[in-house]
Image: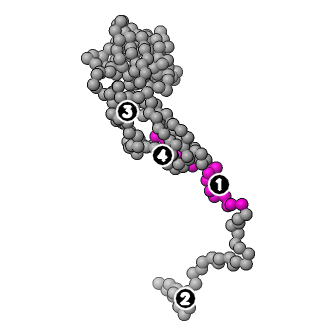
Amino acid sequence: MKTVSLSGSLRANVGKVDANALRAKGHVPCVIYGGNEQIHFHADTRAFKDVIYTPETSIVEINLDGKTYKTVLQESQFHKVSDKLIHADFLQIVDGKPVTVHLPVKTIGMAEGVKDGGKLHIKMRKLKVKGLINKLPERIELNIEKLTIGKAIAAGDIKLDGITILHPDNITVVSVQVTRAVVAEETTPAAGTSTAPAAGAAATPAATATPAAGAKAAPADKKK
């Protein structure tokens, strides 16, 4: 997993008023937890370009007043209207202690089902996993070359050494779905064939409820 850097400053005051004042200046209130104590700081919004506004997951080295903390991003909050980043939480990496991160999914190769006219559908573009930081890759690569139409790769099918995937085993990660073109091709008669009855063949009559020979019809209900 690659490493990116983020520089910030420790917060002198912690509270809603101070947080709003920082946001008005274009800064984002943040916190580092998981170590001996929580560390509250703030950083310029532009500093998050390689931390949040990227599909990749990285180790984030946060530099605060001459001290560096090795972390991973855990949560980011955005304004409901403006969609601006308003808060970020970081988990401090401790040697020998597993961390939880979201790793991007990357497919490798072309699926057999796509070659046959199907459509590749990536349902989970990131997977939540847990493991030691030195075991975590930058991304999860899935070879889909043998995936045929109607088949899928589920979370339970993915095995990574030393890493636990934090999703139900049956949840679909990637699949090849049938398309209308494939359905139309399968239902269209071959050239030269016809669905009409062969010449001279009698049409099959509709089924009727005829009493057997000699059988008596059921008597009509008597009026009471």
Secondary element at image label 3: strand
Q: Disc 2 marks which residue?
A: 212
Which residue sits at x=55%, y=86%?
Answer: 211
Check residue 152 in the rendering and tell me which mark sits there, or answer none.
4
Label 1: how many Cα within 10 Å (few below 14, some 14–19, many 20+): few
Provide residue 163's location: percent of width, then percent of height: 35, 34
On the question of residue 187 being in view, the answer is yes
- What whole-number distance in Å separates the C-alpha atoms at marks 2 and 1? 46 Å
Tell me the CA gap for discs 1 and 4: 22 Å
Q: Residue 56, position in %: x, y?
A: 47, 25
User: Reading the chain from its start, which is encountered first: label 3 or label 1?
Assistant: 3
User: According to the image, label 3 marks what residue?
Assistant: 129
Give the vertical position of 169 relative to 219 (above or below): above
**Which mark is first along the chain, 4 or 3?**
3
What amino acid does circle 2 point to?
Ala
Amino acid type, mark 3:
Val
5 relative to 75, above or below = above
Say which element carries label 1: helix
User: Is residue 186 or residue 26 the one in the foreground?
Assistant: 186
Q: Nearer the viewer, mark 3 or mark 2?
A: 3
Region in magenta: 173-191
Sequence-wise, the earlier of marks 2 and 1 is: 1
Q: Which of marks 2 and 4 is nearer the N terminus?
A: 4
Query: Spatial distance from mark 2 to mark 4, Cα to Cα?
Result: 54 Å
